[in-house]
Amino acid sequence: MSAGVLGSRVRLASLQRLHILQAHLNVLPRGTSRPMSSRDGPEGEVLLQTSGCAGVITLNRPKALNALNLSMIRKIFPQLKKWEEDDQTSIVMIKGVGDKAFCAGGDIRAVADAGKAGGSLIQDFFREEYILNNAIGTLRKPYVALIDGITMGGGVGLSVHGHFRVATERTLFAMPETGIGLFPDVGGGFFLPRLRGKLGLFLALTGFRLKGRDVQQAGLATHFVESQKLAALERDLVQLKCPSQKDVAGVLDAYQAQSCAGREQPFVLEEHMQDVDRLFGGSSVEDVVRRLEAERSPFAEKQLQTLKRMSPTSMKVTFRQLASGASMSLQEVLAMEYRLSQACMRGHDFYEGVRAVLIDKDQQPKWQPASLEQVTDEMVDGYFQSLGSSDLHL
């Protein structure tokens, strides 16, 4: 392949990645079924309903790609706990309105604005989001997330820790946080290192996008069902009588068996998995970069160019986050990630990343420090230090 063609492909991939990252960030800071909340405005941003045996959570901000904000978290969490104790509720389902997104992430713009103004949202949002993530991960009843459309950041936290995650041909999964001076949170330190080989670290550092059936093949979704079958799937689930986890799995298995889209396609990274394991199996981010530089293959060059755009601090923090999280419980990981979130709020790169991608849209963040070599171990240590009485306890 000529250098010109390779360069064109790298630039195209870069533009596509930036568009997805903007979708992840560009959320507006707005605030027989028995609807518990169905009005327009902030009260209608999330709909909480019971239908048959199920408690149903519907994210209702389609214009903002169903982005998660604090008021939504504060509605979902108590209702989830009520359903967990309710004898009439056997399963919980979560879905998003519209055909573009399940949930494109958290309301990062509002968090950045609060951080600049010294507002408490920078503590409250992350603390309460992680508490909700833990509640999903420890729920005693089957939890089914219909991740139809964009599923990133906060949307991953609302789905990946549950028992069942149903991807469709429209699902687009990514954790692009290193591109805005953050890290793959919402329990990323727990589920990413538990994917096969070095796939989790690869996804975390590069923000690589997985689509459709690839989300299941990566181990992030448990099932694949064509989007046109979701309405029927939902009806069959809510009509179950006191279903067990096995009963729910049986229904999902049956719908998956009827879904042929992409069945014969290999995993998008299958031919590169040995490369991923070898190249991202380094002892540090610098080691990963050195391996990519020495490889001189189109695949390695593409990943190298991607990493060069990311925040050096975020990459080093993420590398340690996943290395530590591999042997931690979900609760320990979320407590660690709360410390990391607050360190990011005190730092420079998060605000600079939001500026470059969302506000000025020049796509030219000026990271501080600007290179991996300038990010010392002591700097990274500071991100993991205890917050004392402000630590998150689960």
Image (tube, rainbow, N blue to C red):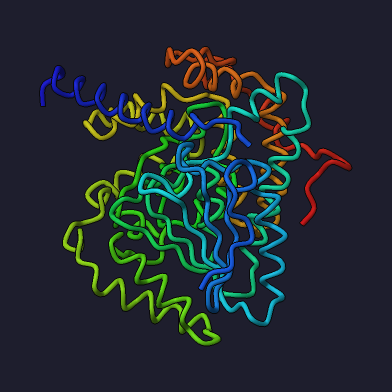
Q: Residue furthest front?
A: 39
Q: Is residue 157 left or right of residue 304?
A: right
Q: Is residue 232 above or below residue 296?
A: below
Looking at the picture, how far across and down is residue 279, in whole percent?
A: 36, 39
Residue at the far bottom: name it: 241
- Vertical order, 206 against 46 (above or below): above
Query: Is 297 situated above or below 190?
Result: above
Q: Position of residue 85 (x, y in %)?
A: 72, 75
Q: Position of residue 159 (x, y in %)?
A: 51, 57
Where is residue 76, by image quadrant? bottom right
The residue positioned farthest toward the right in the image shown: 389
Which residue is most to the left? 1
Q: How many marks?
A: 0
Query: In this rendering, would 263 be left or right of 58?
Result: left
Quarter occupied by the N terminus: top left
Question: Taking 12 as reference, is 165 left or right?
Answer: right
> Residue visible at 25% across and 49% down?
268
Quarter-wise, where is residue 373 in the image?
top right
Taking the spot 40% from the left edge, 41% from the top edge, the residue there is 280
| Residue for point 55% across, 79% down | 53
Left or right? Give the position of 294 relative to 146: left
Q: Residue at x 64, y 81 (%)?
A: 88
Residue 198 is situated, as x and y percent measured from the top left of the image, at 42, 49
Res 328 visible: no
Check the picture and name the quadrant holding the C terminus.
bottom right
Q: Is residue 237 visible?
A: yes
Quadrant of residue 3 within the rendered picture: top left
Q: Nearer the viewer, residue 344 or 31?
A: 31
